[in-house]
Image (spheres, rainbow, N blue to C red):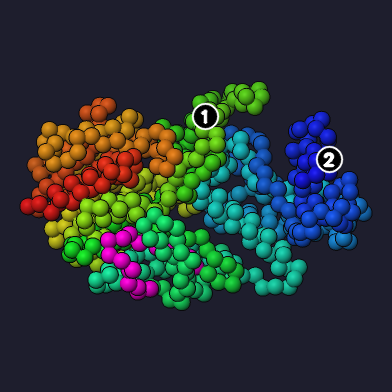
């Protein structure tokens, strides 16, 4: 970009002003004559037509209690006799601003908080609204200083819905100008499942996700993407229905799939990823259930003068990953004043994680578990938890259930109905597992909150189920922060002597900040691994009419893939032994 026209309008004398001034001039240079930069409107620029500009901001401001500061919108129409250089009215910026703000507030009110605050629409000469020579909006979505706002702002479900609202507002603004029909991109499919038919043949099935806010978002067809081993996904296969039968190209190889929904408005985000591998000499089939479908913001607390993020209890779980996490909060005193950006007072956090990825839910854990199963010599298929909970889903024909619970834990819903989301043992799960073990099947269950969740929510049914069927009860959460477990004397001849899982920072594995310690229940249950830091039980083995191995830490958080392979092999071989 030209320095004096775009990159540094102040000729290097004021970097702060150059920062915000250059943004609009960059847009103008992309367009060029007659919409070029402020100092040279006739500059040919790059000749790229631009329909609109959105500056995405968060605002400052603090309230006590649960008052949301809300959404402010800014445009600028007070220059050049109210016209853009090409003769279009600058009030088009007000239309853009009104449509997007209305869409944001409407969607947030419908999905999360009915009384979300709609603040003013300002006509002000803020640089990012004033400088662009095309319709422009400066959005102040919420207050990044205010706890009530950031309970939502740090949650990936809210982030997705707000981003979708902005996209819908942009679409409406553009299509209204051209008299085009509004068709909204679909939501990702759900209830995904892979089931084996025979030999190398499998059936994929799924359901469309209806958008209650947008009737036009109904999908017209779907796309099935396939991945071989750890390669990239292919270009996808179009499917008009809700299922696809296909033959896997090869035995022994792991094939993974994800589904998108499409209509005239575009293509949805992908579904979770499910995997399968068929071993011709393996007649018994392992069913991998992806029970970890949680994405969420961090835990919070507020006692009035002391408030903030409970990072020791519940770190955020982004969708896939995030770079917005800077470090752990250290100032919880609401009365701590802001002094400067290096001493920001209440809400201040360390900056040691700036630029580092925060790993969230990859929705690809059936591949990690499945790879260890395949390497142990066994066939497997995988299903979503919604499919597994469905009463119509048949669990007969499987010898082992591998239940992935990750960091699944019941938390208050962001929805305004005060429900609890992301429970570990739902009634549907309990019923299906009980049916499975009645037939003598074996279960591998792993997750950081498999015991804490039922105690946290005082779920007597789940506690009785865990005690009588799975063979464990809750001892404590926050059981360990070293990431090291040691085999007990009772199991050392069968299982690995030591396992390391990720309790800190890892580039590719999420942090397990508060794993569970378990208690063996009944004469047929015993501890087989202990946390090295305090000798509480990290794994309980139930060996009765059916076999269950329950891990208080997620299997996928084991950092060494060779250890995962060996551990899985030992587990399944034990299940297969008499």
Q: Position of residue 535 (x, y in %)?
A: 22, 28
Residue drawn at the location 71% of the way across and 68% of the way down: 175
Note whether 154 is above or below 180 in the view shown. Answer: above
Whether residues under marks 1 and 2 lie with C-beta atoms below 8 angstroms apart, the answer is: no
**Is residue 255 part of the magenta span, yes or no?**
yes
Q: Position of residue 122 (x, y in %)?
A: 78, 47
Look at the image and tell me whether residue 424 can be seen. Answer: no
- Give the label, 1 or 2, closer to the camera: 2
| Residue in front for this viewpoint, 105 or 226 | 226
Task: State the mark number for residue 525.
Answer: none
Task: State the mark number for residue 4.
Answer: 2
Task: State the mark number for residue 352.
Answer: 1
Q: Label 1: few (<14), some or many (≥20) within 10 Å?
A: few
Q: Position of residue 319 (x, y in %)?
A: 48, 49
**Is residue 409 part of the magenta span, yes or no?**
no
Q: Residue furthest right?
A: 81
Q: Residue furthest left?
A: 578
Residue drawn at the location 44% of the way across and 45% of the way down: 360
Q: In the picture provided, is 152 more to the left or to the right than 386?
A: right
Note whether 107 is above or below 480 in the view shown. Answer: below
Start-end of magenta stretch: 244-261
């Amino acid at each position: 970009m030209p320095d004096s026209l775009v990159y540094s309008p102040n000729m290097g004398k004021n970097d702060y002003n150059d920062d915000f001034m250059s943004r609009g001039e960059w847009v103008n240079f992309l367009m060029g004559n007659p919409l070029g930069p402020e100092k040279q409107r006739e500059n040919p620029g790059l000749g790229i037509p631009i329909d609109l500009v959105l500056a995405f901001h968060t605002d400052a401001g603090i309230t006590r209690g649960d008052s949301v500061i809300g959404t402010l919108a800014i445009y600028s129409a007070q220059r050049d006799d109210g016209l853009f250089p090409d003769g279009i009215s600058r009030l088009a910026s007000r239309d853009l601003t009104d449509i997007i703000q209305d869409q944001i507030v409407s969607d947030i009110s419908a999905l999360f908080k009915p009384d979300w605050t709609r603040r003013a629409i300002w006509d002000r000469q803020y640089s990012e609204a004033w400088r662009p020579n095309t319709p422009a909006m400066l959005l102040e979505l919420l207050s990044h200083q205010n706890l009530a706002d950031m309970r939502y702002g740090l949650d990936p479900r809210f982030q997705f819905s707000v981003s979708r609202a902005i996209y819908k507002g942009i679409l409406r603004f553009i299509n209204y100008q051209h008299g085009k029909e509004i068709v909204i991109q679909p939501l990702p499919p759900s209830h995904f499942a892979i089931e084996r038919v025979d030999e190398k043949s499998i059936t994929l099935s799924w359901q469309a996700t209806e958008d209650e806010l947008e009737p036009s978002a109904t999908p017209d067809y779907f796309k099935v993407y396939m991945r071989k081993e750890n390669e990239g996904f292919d270009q996808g296969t179009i499917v008009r229905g809700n299922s696809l039968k296909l033959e896997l190209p090869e035995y022994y190889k792991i094939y993974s799939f994800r589904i998108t929904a499409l209509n005239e408005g575009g293509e949805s985000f992908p579904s979770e990823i499910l995997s399968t591998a068929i071993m011709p000499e393996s007649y018994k089939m392992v069913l991998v259930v992806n029970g970890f479908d949680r994405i969420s913001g961090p835990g919070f607390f507020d006692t009035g003068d002391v408030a903030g993020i409970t990072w020791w209890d519940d770190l955020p779980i982004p969708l896939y990953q995030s770079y917005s996490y800077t470090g752990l909060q250290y100032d919880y005193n609401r009365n701590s004043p802001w002094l400067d950006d290096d001493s920001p007072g209440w809400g201040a956090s360390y900056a040691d994680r700036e630029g580092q990825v925060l790993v969230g839910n990859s929705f690809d854990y059936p591949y990690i578990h499945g790879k260890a199963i395949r390497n142990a010599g066994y066939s497997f298929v995988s299903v979503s938890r919604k499919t597994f909970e469905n009463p119509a889903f048949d669990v007969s024909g499987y010898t082992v259930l591998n239940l992935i619970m990750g960091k699944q834990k019941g938390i208050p819903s962001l929805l305004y109905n005060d429900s609890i989301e992301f429970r570990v043992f739902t009634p549907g799960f309990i019923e299906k597992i009980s049916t499975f073990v009645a037939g003598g099947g074996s279960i591998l269950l792993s997750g950081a909150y498999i015991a804490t969740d039922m105690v946290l929510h005082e779920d007597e049914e789940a506690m009785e189920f865990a005690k009588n069927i799975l063979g464990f009860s809750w001892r404590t959460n926050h059981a360990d922060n070293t990431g090291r477990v040691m085999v007990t004397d009772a199991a050392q001849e069968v299982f690995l002597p030591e396992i390391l899982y990720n309790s800190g920072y890892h580039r590719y594995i999420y942090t397990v900040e508060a794993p569970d310690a378990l208690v063996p229940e009944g004469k047929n249950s015993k501890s087989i691994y202990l946390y090295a830091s305090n000798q509480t039980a990290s794994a309980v083995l139930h060996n009765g009419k059916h076999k269950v191995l329950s891990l208080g830490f997620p299997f996928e958080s084991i950092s060494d893939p060779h250890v995962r392979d060996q551990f899985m092999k030992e587990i399944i071989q034990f299940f297969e032994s008499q």
